Amino acid sequence: MKKSFALFLLFLSLSLFSSLFAQSFKFAVMSDSRGRFNGVNEPVLSALANHLVENNPDAKFLFFPGDMVNGSKTNPAQTVNQLHHWREVMSPVYNNPNMIWPKIWTTVGNHEVQHRDDEKNFKKIFNNVFMNGPEDELGLTYSFDYENVHFTIIDSDRWYYGDPDDTLDDRRDWHSIKHLDWVENDLKAARQRGVKWIFVISHETVFPTGGHLRDGLANLGLNFTLPLDSVKQNSLNQRNKFWEILKKYNAAAYFCGHEHVYSRQSIEGVYQIIAGSSGAPIYYFNPTFDEKRDTIIAGMEMLYEQSVPYYKVFNYNYGPGKNSQASDDFVGKRAFHYVTLNVEDDEVKVETYGAYVKEDNLSEMGSEIQLIDEFVIKRETEF
Ligand SMILES: [Fe+2]
């Protein structure tokens, strides 16, 4: 009797000890699921959502930064209908009892913002978020802490509302982060609270890797040639300033979509992880000097010679034997996928699960869903 009581005490103290120091938890990221089934690539998104729930019962929540649906320039009711359909397809996640409120953290991509009513409608459908963003982005830009980790979700695809009495004085205002001061103050406050990890999530790429070399946050435009004019320089400056803020507060990673591929690379100490297709047609990566590509393709990809002015401005590794990307450690996969992150005290284990694309149909899976990448992010700087 005494022995079993002693064992019980030992078990109790071990449990208390491990719970005191257990800070490990898992979250997931996926993006860009638009397609032809009421605006959604239902077969692919459904397969990934089910795989996530069945294979990652310990995941606490999922981030989904935009281009969930095709949307519409002229019919906002159609976009609303597509977004409701997206929620139905994601029901395995919404009904997963292991995840915690609100289960999926969303913000818009450019496809959800094509009409002046779209932002208002989106906020009504995805209203379970924190209302602590900039005043004109409440419900679209927000942040929160979970355990000892800070998450900042940013709208990078706004609508510009001009004169309220002039319905022609408004337009899409994509590919920019309007409130860099808010971002900086948010990350600074998180560090002052003593968080151990910072993750930032938005739709647009900072370092484009393929189909959106011409836009992303730098937004250099079609047929760009040097020298930079003042408008493009200003856009590039804003994009550079954003990355400087992530570096300054030692963000572990920036997640985005927009490019329909999976990729990750570490740029000046911060990972950019593109979780860019859970259904949207798969793109190709930036052309390299050695690649004899003579056709164009899926998104807005270009041939090598057309890409060089962009590579120069972005300071990419280009030329013979180079990868035409921002970093030598670039890893990219042409697959439909989701990314999981297991956050521990001093490192984050990243695992990406995906299905490679069918070569003759860029919207269909050509393999089983499998582990396609894994790596570790180490926490090196104390704040
Ligand atoms: Fe996009």
Image (cartoon, rainbow, N blue to C red):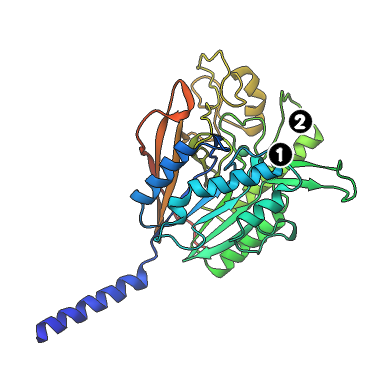
Question: What is the quadrant of residue 38 in the picture?
Answer: top right
Seen at 76% across and 46% down, the residue is 116
SS under mark 1: helix
Q: Position of residue 323 (x, y in %)?
A: 50, 27
The image shows residue 306, relative to residue 42, as above or below, that is above
* First in sequence: mark 2 vs mark 1: 2
Can you give x and y, in whole percent of width and height, for residue 242 in the image? 66, 48
Inspect this view and state whether residue 333 appears: no
Q: Is residue 70 left or right of residue 23?
A: right
Q: Residue furthest bottom?
A: 2
* Nearer to me, 260 or 291: 260
* Residue kind at label 1, given as amino acid type: Leu
Q: Residues within 10 Å of mark 1 (few under 14, many from 20)?
A: many
Rendered image: mark on residue 236? 1
Q: Quarter of the image containing the N terminus?
A: bottom left
Image point 69% across, 59% down: which residue? Answer: 138
As displayed, is residue 171 above or below residue 359?
A: below
Tell whether label 1 touches label 2 (CB within 8 Å).
yes
Label 2 and label 1: CA atoms lie apart by 9 Å
Using the image as rendered, state which of residue 141 and residue 381 is in the foreground. Answer: 141
Residue 283 appears in view: yes
Instruction: Name the quadrant where ligand 1 sits.
Output: top right
* Mark 1 close to ligand 1, CB under 8 Å: no
Which residue type carries mark 2? Leu
Percent coordinates x, y for residue 46 in the rendering: 44, 42
Q: Is residue 244 above or below residue 258?
A: below
Q: Which residue does the image show at 88% across and 49% down from the upper left?
A: 163
- Label 2: element kind: loop
Q: Up-down: is 160 above or below 343?
A: above
| Residue named by callout 2 | 228
The crowd level at tag 2 (other Cα within 10 Å; few <14, some 14-19, many 20+) is some
